[in-house]
Image (cartoon, grey):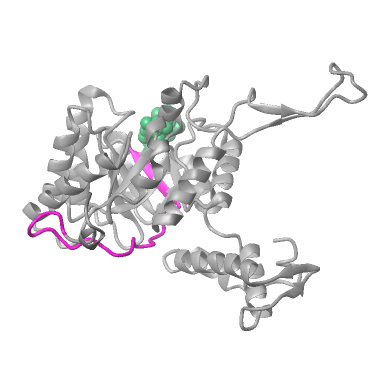
Amino acid sequence: MRSPKDFFAPLAVGAPTPLREVPARPSRVIHFFDPSNAKMAAKVPAMVGTVDVLLGNLEDAVRAARKEAARAGLVEIARGTDFGEATQLWTRINSLDSPWALDDLTTLVTEVGDKLDVIMVPKVQGPEDIHYVDRLLAQLEARAGLQRPILVHAILETARGVANVEQIAGASPRMQGLSLGPADLAADRRMKTTRVGGGHPGYLVRQDPVDGDINANRQTYQQDLWHYTIARMVDACAMHGIFPYYGPFGDIQDVVACEDQFRNAFLLGCVGTWSLHPVQVEIAKRVFSPSAEDVAHARRVVAAMGDGTAAVMLDGKMEDDASLKQCLVMLELAERLAATDPELAQLYAAEPGPSEGAGA
Ligand SMILES: CC(=O)SCCNC(=O)CCNC(=O)[C@H](O)C(C)(C)COP(=O)(O)OP(=O)(O)OC[C@H]1O[C@@H](n2cnc3c(N)ncnc32)[C@H](O)[C@@H]1OP(=O)(O)O
Ligand SMILES: CC(=O)C(=O)O
Ligand SMILES: [Mg+2]
């Protein structure tokens, strides 16, 4: 086991020094594209500035015969695109046990490592997977002469990964965040679903019988299949100062349920999600940005709380140190997003109206 004193030491001579704090850059929407798909790749330059993260996907959803083409396509896009300040470039490499992962890492870091912010590693089982990537990245960064470390994001998509989530989150100073991988996770757990994320009409609770009649019309309430895993992931991330994300919502046409799933994740503490199709981009950005009402309410609580101690009444509700802290989380996020999103800056700059804040 590494001594805690060595945790922030570079893992290869000449590699950049690991960061002490993960940069809190906006990442409400991680937009997936297949760099081997000419039509999708052609759309990437125009998406710069419209999404927080553009992610060149090399893993699942890219045909085995197109893996090399996807890797080469990503190198070309990275070299030829100016991503500016508002959009990051990430990639999802192939899984560590695949024939492609080593070449994915070697090629991308040595050829376009200066353009890559985060490498997403799928099917992470435990901290040992992160340790492997950590050392290899340090060696490759040193070879490429990189000045800043590339961060690592793990997908939680195996039962063992979920069982080890706290150790994964804390395995390296490179750890940027975790995403839920509901499709592979469902298969690995042998869940009896056939979907990519979202709910299931069979997973429900039913109202008790009225007057003992079990056949009477009884209300049912669909439950969230992913609540347990997302909550564990959020706690592990908060504990280690990294960021939690929802993941894919595969029913592209059902934008309503997609928004619900994203909002559940936002309310539970996630900072963003994935978009698989352009139609999901606006939903993700909207859901993972605090509303004007939430911001106005948070400002009223801050103003009412004075030095931040004691209890006050606002609109019939008790506010104290703990509700103030929640409001500060909301305001910090709003400020951070407004710094790179002019529309949000304008929205949040507006004075709160007379009714705002009452029900936020
Ligand atoms: C479980 C997991 O691992 S999830 C992560 C892996 N999966 C992915 O990354 C999937 C990424 N998305 C996709 O492959 C596609 O969006 C699909 C297959 C879901 C749907 O594709 P299509 O049937 O072509 O969608 P549709 O016809 O609505 O596309 C409309 C336009 O948007 C483009 N488009 C679709 N998805 C994307 C995308 N992710 N990025 C950029 N453009 C896209 C299409 O090329 C098409 O362009 P055109 O108007 O010039 O013809
Ligand atoms: C996200 C992902 O890879 C999955 O759901 O399997
Ligand atoms: Mg997967």
Q: Which residues are magenta?
A: 10-33
Identity of the residue drawn at 27% across and 24% down: 63
The number of callouts visible is 0
Judged from the image, the quadrant occupied by ligand 3 is top left
- Answer yes or no: is residue 158 visible: no
Residue displayed at 10% across by 50% down: 139
**Is residue 4 placed above or below 205 in the rendered structure?**
below
Percent x, y of residue 142:
9, 55
Q: Looking at this rendering, what residue extends furthest in the right direction?
A: 211
- The question of residue 18 being in magenta is answered with yes
Left or right side of 271 for 328: right
The reply to whether the magenta stretch includes residue 285 is no
Q: Main secondary structure of the magenta part?
A: loop
Can you give x and y, in whole percent of width and height, for residue 289 in the image? 53, 57
Residue 314 place in picture, x, y as percent: 76, 72
Comparing 10 with 183, the one in front is: 10
Q: Quadrant of the C terminus?
A: bottom right
- Residue closest to the far top: 215
| Vertical arrangement, residue 50 with respect to residue 328, above or below | above
Residue 100, percent across and down?
Answer: 18, 31
Let me know if residue 64 appears in the view: yes
Q: Is residue 59 above or below residue 307?
A: above
Near-viewer residue (86 or 300): 300
Residue at image point 61% right, 38% down? 256
- Side (left or right) of 168 relative to 212: left
Residue situated in front as seen by the camera: 18 or 182: 18
